[in-house]
């Protein structure tokens, strides 16, 4: 089930949204939904990180300690490659 939400956009943003929707042949609703989904996920991740940084019981470790915990340098290289 979905819920309708109404939003007013600045004129320039509305023009850009219309142009992009036409360019990629997607609806404005699709683009807004995707953008909002991405924003919410990023902001939730930010809040988790902020909470973890302020949690005195959640230890912060160095890269060297991480490598040691993972067991090998190769494991860390896989993590780095997946970020690229």
Image (spheres, rainbow, N blue to C red):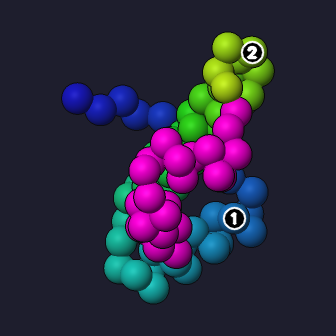
Q: Residue at x 76, y 21 (%)?
A: 54
Residue 34 placement (x, y as % from top left): 44, 55
Which type of secondary structure does the marked residue at label 1 adopt? helix
Q: Up-down: is 6 above or below 25?
A: above
Q: Nearer the viewer, residue 57 or 82?
A: 57
Residue 51 placement (x, y as % from top left): 68, 23
Which type of secondary structure does the marked residue at label 2 adopt? loop
Closer to viewer: mark 1 or mark 2: 2
For the record, the magenta segment spans 60-84
Q: Give the overall secondary structure of the magenta segment.
A: helix
Q: Which residue is mark 1?
A: 13
Q: Residue at x 29, y 32 (%)?
A: 2
Q: Nearer the viewer, residue 4 or 66?
A: 66
Residue at the farthest bottom position: 23
Judge left or right: residue 4 versus residue 49. Answer: left
Residue 28 can be seen in this image: no
Q: Residue at x 65, y 52 (%)?
A: 63
Q: Up-down: is 25 above or below 47?
A: below
Determine the CA span between mark 1 and mark 2. 42 Å
Question: Are the residues at dot 1 and dot 2 in contact (C-beta closer than 8 Å)?
Answer: no
**Does 71 appear in magenta?**
yes
Q: Which residue is mark 2?
A: 56
């Amino acid at each position: 089930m979905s819920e309708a939400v109404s939003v007013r956009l600045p004129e320039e943003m509305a023009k850009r949204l219309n142009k992009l929707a036409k360019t990629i042949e997607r609806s404005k609703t699709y683009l807004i939904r995707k953008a909002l989904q991405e924003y919410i996920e990023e902001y939730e991740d930010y809040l988790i990180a902020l909470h973890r940084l302020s949690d005195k019981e959640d230890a912060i470790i160095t890269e060297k300690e991480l490598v040691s915990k993972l067991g090998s340098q190769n494991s860390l290289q896989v993590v780095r490659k997946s970020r690229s």
